[in-house]
Image (spheres, rainbow, N blue to C red):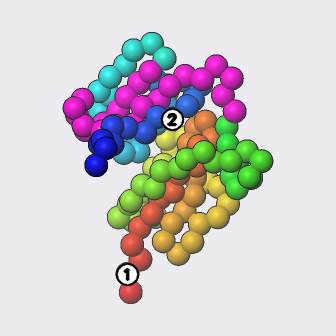
Amino acid sequence: MIGRWHGLIIDCPDPGALAGFYQELLGMDRVYEEGDWVVIGDAPDRPGVAFQRVAEFTPPHWPDPAHPQQMHLDVRVDDIEQAEPRVLALGASPLPGGGKTFRVYADPVGHPFCLVWQVTG
């Protein structure tokens, strides 16, 4: 091992606002904030998700390879029918695609993410 995972950094136009969206989505706390940088996580000494301001942010377009997604998160949920209205109320938008065990959304600035669940039966 060379090192340990420290965090995922997401470019965005407003770090505070996008961090708030993901705090609600993931149930994390804001563990650090300074200027154009906000970090959320379980604790300050554990890996987290950071948001950094990019002045000329260009959002990805799903699924357009001319504007690649750059990254996406998979968020596990127990019940998609309960989770979907909640994530839409936070400001997410549905995107095309998905399958038997996942649905695709965009966060408020356009980054794609998926709600995934285990289908039984």
Residue 65, which numbered label?
A: none
Horizontal side of residue 54 vs 1, given as left or right: right
Quarter of the image that includes the C terminus: bottom left
Q: Nearer the viewer, residue 89 or 68?
A: 68
Q: Quadrant of residue 46?
A: top left
Callout 1–callout 2 Cβ contact below 8 Å: no
Looking at the picture, tell me which residue is in the foreground, 17 or 12: 12
Residue type at mark 1?
Thr
Picture residue at 55% right of the left edge, 31% below the top:
11
Give the SS element for disc 1.
loop
Q: Is residue 119 magenta?
A: no
Examine the image and state in which quarter residue 7 appears: top left
Residue nearest the viewer, comparing 79 with 14: 14
Pinpoint residue 87: horizontal percent, then vertical percent: 48, 49
Q: Is residue 120 above or below residue 18?
A: below
Picture residue at 63% right of the left edge, 48% below the top: 69
Q: Residue furthest top?
A: 35
For the point 51% across and 66% down, which residue is it? 102
Question: Residue lying furthest right in this view?
Answer: 66
User: Residue 120 got which mark?
Assistant: 1
Is residue 56 among what the camera can see?
Answer: yes
- Give the CA separation, mark 1 to mark 2: 33 Å
**Outermost residue, bottom direction?**
121
Q: What's drawn in magenta, residue-wise? A: 37-58
Of label 1 and label 2, which has the lower sequence position? 2
Q: Is residue 49 magenta?
A: yes
Task: Residue type at mark 2: give it.
Answer: Ile
Residue 54's x, y, as percent?
A: 60, 23
Q: Left or right of 22: which side holds 109?
A: right
Q: Tell me residue 92's x, y (percent).
A: 56, 45
Q: Point out which mark residue 10 bears.
A: 2
Q: Residue at x 61, y 36 (%)?
A: 109
